[in-house]
Image (cartoon, rainbow, N blue to C red):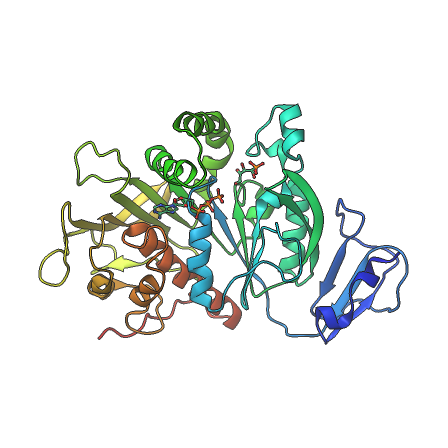
């Protein structure tokens, strides 16, 4: 049976036509490959055997590709929820699809989880004695082919790794969105995939904080023991150090999460010191700054306009180098007592790519229940979300310079 018969023009897009070419040039590993183009380049119609080409004339917008790398349990999902909220609309799994799909789709964005490119399922990894972090457990050729196809306006049948069963499920159709986010362990590992990214982010959670978050989630919410959490972190560490952590040198922005320096010897992981490390010279991205671009500034905003209980809040901003690259670093140590007062901090930040005065504060208040909303993780994730919106708008409108943020009150 032709793959085409599984799709109707109506189910895809009213401006699409379906055809089966004699030959496909996409070297996918799966037998049943479905892809479609936005602009009509291939002719032909009707169905037959072999892959199916769906040709669409709808729109000529391009897909902007964003990479988000982090270890498991390091806040990728929370970050994704903040990011998709900036673009508006709820992000949901594909309608009528596999209930265990890892994909989230909203009007503007599609977030795919790179776990779907595991080439070995749970049993396969166990038999071969490799972790999911090991490149040998992942299919980078397929990842590259499919991200490249989506970026150029072609839909793909992407595999699904089922975290409930530990098996690879039948694929799901991913149509080219306006913004594709590839999140997971390895978005910057393979040079070919890396080169497809318009912007990349690495969430760098220090071991102490990772441990504290894991305890909070896996012990409190999933009933794991302290020892099993420790053992799982230890077992992943060699591969994490070898294959995941080195990707941060390629990232355009790194959100580094460390224990606070405001409380001596703190190891609770509740108060955090968070650093937003922003590469200089990245196309369509101009780093955020505090007060005066390029200066080195320490700021304790606590006082008449910002309520701070112990241990207070401290900001730092300045130029630096990171893996040999020039960067600007904005740092926040401590946590907010009253989120509505964040407007005071926001009004001292520049280049935050807001569309109106107070947009950062509004976003933070909207998601006050998300983890990290009272500290630099939530603040910097929100700002990076706004910078990505700005980057998207610049790329699609063909501009190069970042527009100014909303006028300050
Ligand atoms: N900014 C934060 N502050 C405090 N805790 C956090 C923060 N971000 C995440 N966490 C904790 O880490 C847990 C995992 O977060 P999240 O689900 O966003 O991570 P993830 O990287 O998507 O995880 P996984 O890959 O395992 O699904 C949350 O349940 C929460 O306990
Ligand atoms: O690192 C991971 C996700 O980021 C997971 O450990 C990996 O995907 C394997 O999943 P599972 O433990 O459900 O088999």
Extreme-front residue of the structure? 223
280 relative to 294 in the view: left or right: right
Does residue 283 appear anywhere in the picture? no
Q: Residue at x 17, y 41 (%)?
A: 262
In the rendered view, would you say 18 is above or below 226? below
Q: Residue 110's x, y, as percent?
A: 56, 60
Q: Nearer the viewer, residue 380 or 92?
A: 92
Nearer to me, 33 or 270: 270
* Residue 142 lies in quadrant: top right
Measured from the top left, where is residue 346 in percent x and y? Answer: 25, 63
Most extreme residue toward the left is: 304
Q: Quadrant of ligand 1?
A: top left
Q: Position of residue 32 (x, y in %)?
A: 79, 51
* Residue drawn at 75 percent across, 47 percent down: 28
Quarter occupied by the C terminus: bottom left
Can you see residue 52?
A: yes
Count up the numbered dots: 0
């Amino acid at each position: 049976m032709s793959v085409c018969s599984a799709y109707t023009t109506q189910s895809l897009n009213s401006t699409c036509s379906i055809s089966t070419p004699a030959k496909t040039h996409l070297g996918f590993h799966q037998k049943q490959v479905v892809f479609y183009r936005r602009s009509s380049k291939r002719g032909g119609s009707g169905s037959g055997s072999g892959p199916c080409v769906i040709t669409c004339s709808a729109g000529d917008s391009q897909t902007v590709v964003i990479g988000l790398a982090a270890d498991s349990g390091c806040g990728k999902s929370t970050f994704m929820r903040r990011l998709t909220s900036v673009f508006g609309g709820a992000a949901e799994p594909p309608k009528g699809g596999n209930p265990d799909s890892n994909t989230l789709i909203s009007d503007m964005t599609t977030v795919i989880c790179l776990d779907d490119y595991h080439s070995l399922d749970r049993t396969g990894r166990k038999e071969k004695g490799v972790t999911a972090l090991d490149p040998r457990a992942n299919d980078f050729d397929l990842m590259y082919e499919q991200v490249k196809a989506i970026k150029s306006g072609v839909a793909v049948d992407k595999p699904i790794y089922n975290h409930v069963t530990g098996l690879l499920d039948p694929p799901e159709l991913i149509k080219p969105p306006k913004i594709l986010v590839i999140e997971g362990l390895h978005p910057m590992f393979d040079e070919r995939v890396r080169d497809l990214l318009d912007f990349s982010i690495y969430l760098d959670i220090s071991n102490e904080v990772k441990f504290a978050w894991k305890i909070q989630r896996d012990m409190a919410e999933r009933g794991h023991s302290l020892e099993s959490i420790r053992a799982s972190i230890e077992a992943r560490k060699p591969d994490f150090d070898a294959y995941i952590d080195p990707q941060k040198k390629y990232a355009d922005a790194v959100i580094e999460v460390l224990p606070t320096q405001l409380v001596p010897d703190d190891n609770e992981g509740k108060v955090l010191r968070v650093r937003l490390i922003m590469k200089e010279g990245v196309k369509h991205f101009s780093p955020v700054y505090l007060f005066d671009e390029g200066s080195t500034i320490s700021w304790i905003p606590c006082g008449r306009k910002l309520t701070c209980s112990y241990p207070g809040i401290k900001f730092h901003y300045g130029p630096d180098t990171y893996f040999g690259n020039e960067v600007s670093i904005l740092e926040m140590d401590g946590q907010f007592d009253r989120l509505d007062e964040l407007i005071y901090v926001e009004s001292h930040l520049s280049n935050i790519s807001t569309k109106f005065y107070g947009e950062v504060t509004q976003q933070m208040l909207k998601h006050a229940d998300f983890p990290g909303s009272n500290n630099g993780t939530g603040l910097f994730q929100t700002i990076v979300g706004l910078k990505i919106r700005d980057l998207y708008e610049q790329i699609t409108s063909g501009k190069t310079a970042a527009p100014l943020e909303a006028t300050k009150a």
